[in-house]
Image (spheres, rainbow, N blue to C red):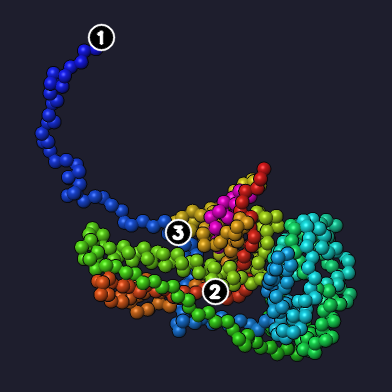
């Protein structure tokens, strides 16, 4: 049985006791919190900026003088795609050694029109060692491996070719040419073929092409070293009063010049913020610090990716290699390393470094670590492997690994900058006050000038199309 009581019969609620001390909510209004400086996720280690030797560049331009070189036609060929049809850009045929410097658009277009498309599948043999070679193959897409027979009868792999490469160029002028290797497709892809007969037909109808080929054929008479540089005549091992050859060192007539690039931004700060909210941290200094960090990040990105002076675009095509199986194996790292003396460092995206570690661990190898400025970093053959997230990763989950020798004294890669700028804040970076607007906003122009130069081609090498995704078990 439930007994209901009226509200008047309920006992009165007890009143809250009076507050005897200051509450925490009110106390926080008067307290100074412990706070951090403004944080920024974009900041990286920026190893490239730290490791490049910076050379003072007065006048804003750095000229790289080299010995005269007869090396020609070592660029890559580009194509255009119209649906399933692929065409070579006529002007791109100038990347072939025998057409280097040839500018007759009519003849180049005629040659491009005579290129026939061939789609291939993985495992298909594109050229057989010892067979007659009567055409040149231009790879529009895909990977092709070249292999031959070693001196002891075992098979050896010569090279791996990819988009933009070609093989069989000597067959266009040599009627007795044979394939020195077997070319086999590692993936499906497309190539364009130009036969010796088609090349000869265009040559017969173009006096300009005939004259160019005759001039090209005289180039091998120029004495040159294995790097293509004009040879310095000398005599060694002679006895008696032998007549010594005369010599001089010839230079490039039109050496490359690197102009300093610029990265700029305008930092705006309201005077009310700078006046009233400057403690305990200086708002102007903190805004400037984060702006400079972002500017340095952009500077490193440009040093890697800029089409004019970026490392990825300025590596000589003879210093670009492909991985033999996709992932970055120790053998691939050794091949990249051996192409230059005194390699100072490797640069790779952090995910690429993880892929390197997986491949090494799978083979029971554990790379050493070296001390770099008090920090332990992974290394291969004593060369540090440094992270650089500015190296792009493609949609196919491939990336690149950069290897370089650095310093002017080593004929390596150098950074370019000019110091002593007006209102310089850091070496090569200036902060200039631009005034206060009618809205009471102060403006500062933040500027940095920079570039990079490759003194000799073998100072910089790139391993391309490095697979970084995990393999399926």
Q: Which of marks 3 and 1 is in front?
A: 1
- The residue under the point 18% across, 17% down is 5
Residue 457: horizontal and vertical position, in percent?
62, 73
Q: What stretch of residues is rendered in magenta?
A: 345-359
Asked if residue 336 is positioned above or below residue 114 in the image, the reply reads above
- Is residue 132 highlighted in magenta? no
Mark 3 lies on a secondary structure that is loop
Give the residue at mark 3. Answer: 44
Kindly indicate whether the residue at mark 2 contacts the one at mark 1 (C-beta within 8 angstroms).
no
Crowding near pointer 2: few (<14 within 10 Å), some, many (20+)? many
Mark before the other along the chain sequence, 1 or 2? 1
Asked if residue 206 is positioned above or below residue 380 in the image, the reply reads below
Q: Quadrant of the N terminus?
A: top left
Q: Which image quadrant for residue 165? A: bottom right
Give the residue at mark 2. Answer: 309
Residue 418: horizontal and vertical position, in percent?
43, 78
Asked if residue 442 is positioned above or below residue 68 in the image, the reply reads above
Mark 1 lies on a secondary structure that is loop
Residue 437: horizontal and vertical position, in percent?
27, 75
Q: In which quarter of the image is the C terminus?
A: top right
- Is residue 348 highlighted in magenta? yes
Spatial CA span between label 2 and label 3: 22 Å
- The residue under the point 49% across, 82% down is 61
Give the residue at mark 1. Answer: 1
Mark 2 lies on a secondary structure that is loop
């Amino acid at each position: 049985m439930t007994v209901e009581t009226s509200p008047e019969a309920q006992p009165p609620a007890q009143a809250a006791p009076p507050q005897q001390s200051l509450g925490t909510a009110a106390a926080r209004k008067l307290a100074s919190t412990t706070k951090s400086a403004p944080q920024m996720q974009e900041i990286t280690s920026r190893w490239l900026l730290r490791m490049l030797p910076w050379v003072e560049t007065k006048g804003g331009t750095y000229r790289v003088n080299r010995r005269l070189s007869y090396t020609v036609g070592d660029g890559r060929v580009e194509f255009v795609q119209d649906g399933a049809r692929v065409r070579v850009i006529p002007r791109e045929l100038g990347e072939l050694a025998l057409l280097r410097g040839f500018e007759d658009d009519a003849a180049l277009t005629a040659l491009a029109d005579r290129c026939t498309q061939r789609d291939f599948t993985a495992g298909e043999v594109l050229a057989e060692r010892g067979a007659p070679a009567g055409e040149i193959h231009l790879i529009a897409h895909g990977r092709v491996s070249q292999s031959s027979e070693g001196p002891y009868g075992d098979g050896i792999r010569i090279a791996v070719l990819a988009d933009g490469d070609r093989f069989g160029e000597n067959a266009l002028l040599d009627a007795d040419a044979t394939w020195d290797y077997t070319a086999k497709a590692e993936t499906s892809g497309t190539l364009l073929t130009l036969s010796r007969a088609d090349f000869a037909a265009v040559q017969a109808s173009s006096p300009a092409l005939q004259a160019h080929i005759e001039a090209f054929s005289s180039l091998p008479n120029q004495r040159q070293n294995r790097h293509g540089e004009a040879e310095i005549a000398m005599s060694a091992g002679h006895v008696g009063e032998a007549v010594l050859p005369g010599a001089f060192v010839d230079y490039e007539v039109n050496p490359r010049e690197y102009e300093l690039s610029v990265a700029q931004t305008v930092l705006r700060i309201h005077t009310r913020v700078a006046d009233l909210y400057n403690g305990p941290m200086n708002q102007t200094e903190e805004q400037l610090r984060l702006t400079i960090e972002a500017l340095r990040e952009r500077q490193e990105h440009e040093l890697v990716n800029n089409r004019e002076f970026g490392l990825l675009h300025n590596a000589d095509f003879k210093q670009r290699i492909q991985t033999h199986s996709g992932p970055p194996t120790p053998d691939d790292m050794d091949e990249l390393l051996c192409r230059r003396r005194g390699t100072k460092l490797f640069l790779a995206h952090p995910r690429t470094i993880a892929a390197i570690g997986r491949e090494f661990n799978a083979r029971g190898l554990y790379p050493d670590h070296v001390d770099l400025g008090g920090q332990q970093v992974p290394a291969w053959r004593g060369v540090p492997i440094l992270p650089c997230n500015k190296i792009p990763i493609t949609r196919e989950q491939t990336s690149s690994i950069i290897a370089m020798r650095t310093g002017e004294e080593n004929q390596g890669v150098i950074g370019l900058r000019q110091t002593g700028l007006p209102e310089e804040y850091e070496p090569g970076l200036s902060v200039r006050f631009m005034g206060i607007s009618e809205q009471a906003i102060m403006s500062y122009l933040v500027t940095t000038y920079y570039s990079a130069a490759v003194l000799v081609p073998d100072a910089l090498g790139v391993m391309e199309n490095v697979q970084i995704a995990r393999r399926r078990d």
